[in-house]
Structures are given as C-alpha cells and as structure tokens.
Image: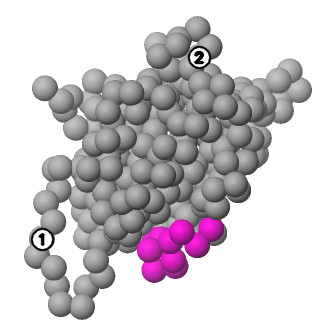
Amino acid sequence: MSLTRRQVTSAAFAAVPLGVAAAGPARAGARRPRTLFIAGDSTAAQKYSDAAPETGWGMALPFFLHKDRPVANHAVNGRSSKSFIDEGRLDAVLAAIRPGDLLLVQFAHNDEKTTDPTRYTEPWTTYQDYLRMYVDGARAKGARPVLVTPVERRRFDAEGNAVPTHGEYPAAMRALAEAERVALLDVQALSLALWQRLGVEETKTYFNWTETEQDNTHFNPPGAIAVARLVAGELLRTRVLGPRDVVRLHDEIPTSWITWPAPLA
C-alpha cells in the first residue's frame, strides 16, 4: 500500500518523545486523546543518534496507532521492574497519567540479573510484587494497566529452533495478569514464534547486528517495527484498543520513518 507524504509526516511526528510534541487546541466533537505510557527497559526505550541503528519498539509503536492515541515512552535502558520504581520513574509516570490512559509494562530482561541486587527480582515473588505496584498505581489514577511479556532475544539451538530465554518470568507475568484481571499482551510467545519463522540468518536483519557488534537483544529499525506491530496487534486482539485506534497493521512501514534525535544534554 502506497503512503502519502502527509501520512509519513504524521507518523514521524507521532514518534517524537514525550514533551517535544505540543498538543493543539481541541476540536469540537474530537476524541479525547488517550495516551499509551510505556514503562520498560532498553528493548522498548527511545534511542538517540549516538546509539543508531539500535531502536526500541516503543519508537515504532506510534506508526500503528491513530493520532489520538499518542505514546509517552518512559522505558529506560537497563531498568528492571524493581530499579524503575526505586529510581522514582513509576512515580513520574503516575504524576503524568490521566484517567482513561493506558500503562504498558514490560520488564524481565534486567530482573533476571541474579548478581545485581539493585535490579534482580525472583519471578514468583518479588517480580510479581513489583509488577503489582504498576497495576495498582495505574488503577488508582483511573488508568488501565496492561502487562506485556518480555520480547524474546535472538537465540537458536543447534537444530535451528528459536529458544526461549526468559525462564519463569513470562509465566509469572501471565499468572499475575490472570489473578489481577489485567490485560496481557503475550509478546514473548509471539516474538519467539516470529524468530522461529524467520530463522537463524534472517533474524540477524531484525537485531542490532553491525560490522562491530552482534547484538541478539536489541533491535534495528526492521526489528523494532516488527515488534511494535506485534504489540499493536495484541492491543487490538485483547480489545484494549478498538479497530479505529490501530492503523497500518498490515501495511509496510518504511524504515526511514525511524529517526534518532540528538542525545539529551
């Protein structure tokens, strides 16, 4: 499907980080924007020009959402469900979130670091305890929490089978979502299936593989777009968002839409 210059401009503007894009005056009868906040780690986070071509899936998510569903990407490199809270980052999100907004929560990559007490959580106890703080915090503000199982790394066995890498964390998140009646986007299962379909070699074109780095955790633009498409599809499937909220789900998204702003001072 061909894309007009106006569509490209609108999608690129939607990807501008929180605080850069100013909201214009509300039109009579217009839908009130409902913001999708992201709390997460480096796989989702905004990247800057000094990290290019590394790309977080949160940078591509706006391309699949109606302009009245803006994204506020608070994900930060290296954070776990615990350290994100300990650093006051959840408090900052909850100070900005409004009734009707969504809080997407994706952690596990850094919760798994058993040698780092500032980040480590145990799947069936402290990990669930911290995730519950996001759930309770969003609900107390009148917003809707959405749990997102951690996107999978690129790992294959000797037979070429994509291998799960997150241990018990996805199962613990699924169990918590069921117990707390929270919407769940099972990106771990979907991304593992996607890597399996693509295979050992083609997946390299989705991850941050460069001449100097072979990164099997973080994405380049095609990978970030592919994962963002999974997230948007799950938001639609679970009815967290409606058909009018999700756009371009089956369209080709040009990688040129991904931009990396200058590093923050």
> Magenta stretch: residue 245 in it?
yes
Left or right of 34? Residue 225 is right
Magenta segment boundaries in residue numbering: 238-247
- Which amino acid type corresponds to the residue marked 2 in the rendered image? Lys
**Residue at image x 58%, y 37%?**
129
Q: What type of secondary structure mainly makes up the magenta span?
A: loop
Q: Position of residue 253 (x, y in %)?
A: 45, 58
Q: Are marks 2 and 1 in contact (CB under 8 Å)?
A: no
Could you tell me which quadrant the C terminus lies in? Answer: top left
Q: Is residue 76 above or below residue 15?
A: above
Callout 1 secondary element = loop
**Residue at image x 22%, y 38%?**
261
Callout 2 secondary element = loop
Q: Position of residue 217 (x, y in %)?
A: 56, 27
> Magenta stretch: residue 162 in it?
no
Instruction: Tell me how far mark 2 sits from mark 1, CA to CA.
Output: 43 Å
Label 1 belongs to which residue?
24
Q: Is residue 91 above or below residue 236?
A: above
**Residue at image x 40%, y 58%?**
140
Q: Earlier in the sequence, mark 2 or mark 1?
A: 1
Q: Position of residue 214 (x, y in %)?
A: 55, 18
Label 2 belongs to which residue?
113
